[in-house]
Image (spheres, grey):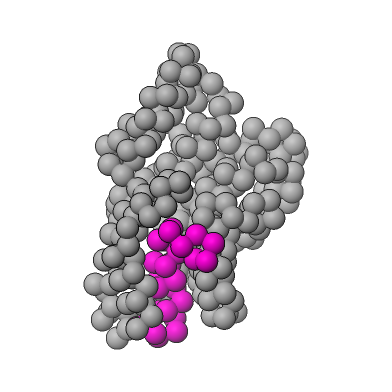
Amino acid sequence: MRTAMLMGCFLLLACGKGKAPAPAVSAAPAGGDASALEAEAVALWAERVDETKLAAALGKYDEVRAADPANRAALVRLTRGWYFFGDGFTTDKTIQAERWQKAIAAGESCLNLNEEYAKRIAAGEKPKDAVGATTKADVPCLYWYSTALGKWSRTQSISVTLKHLSTVKAFIGRVEELQADFFNYGPARYWGAYNIGVPFGKDPEKSEQYFQASIDGAPWYLATRVLRAEFLHVYNRDRAKFEEDLKFVIDADPNSNPDADVGAENVREKNKAKTLLSRADELFD
């Protein structure tokens, strides 16, 4: 139980040994036809459920970025893609940390396309304050940057993650202000986990409300139920609900809403659900 909650705390917090990591997006040759490269990247991205295709898509999007550094779509895909590559395809902490670093770096580049935000950061303003300069166009950058930051924090110390928690909260809060339904009601999903994962002031009632709001808004996105099982149901010692949520995910059609384009992510969540369910005796001992 204690181990699960500690991991939960790590999931929610920011990262870095005192500061966010230096950009780590792999170098790519400059030049080239960005539009042709992007078409290739899009085709590979559509098959991202396959690890090799996701890796190839990220490489191609990196070429797009090199040919067109201000290509927001490529930077969003790099941020989201490197996050997904770390979250869905390995449990090796070192590999995960490397991949999430690249997501963070791409997210920083993406946010810096907003000239006002970049100007305020360059002037020494903290990201949690400069985030007020962001607009709806920045929402994908904000969300995936924050999500990668939170995941990477699992590889860092508690003191460091606590130091940066306010930044993560500010970014997610800004996403909520600008587009609350972004990525299948992602902000509500975050607050659902946050209200249990924080080391102090846990609020299971708020957690349930947020998780349910996210599920009601996007019932086809399976990660919300996996997180609710891992955080809320374990905390409440409710094994019946824990198993109910995870069995729902395991039995679900990952492509129940093709328009949402989260089939690949749902396939990985189904795998997570099976692993988590296999740990039920350990978690409820």
Residue 170 horizontal side relative to residue 88, left or right: right
Give the image location of residue 23, x and y in percent. Answer: 51, 37
Tell me which segment is drawn in magenta.
215-239
Judged by its main secondary structure, the magenta piece is helix
Q: Is residue 190 above or below residue 144?
A: below
Q: Nearer the viewer, residue 219 or 157?
A: 219
Quadrant of the image containing the C terminus:
bottom left
* Residue 63 shows in the view: no
Q: Quadrant of residue 256?
A: bottom left
Q: Is residue 235 above or below residue 218?
A: below
Residue drawn 39% across and 66% down? 226
Q: Nearer the viewer, residue 38 or 161?
A: 38
Q: Is residue 155 magenta?
A: no
Give the image location of residue 99, x and y in percent. Answer: 39, 44
Give the image location of residue 204, x and y in percent. Answer: 54, 80
Residue drawn 48% across and 19% down? 35
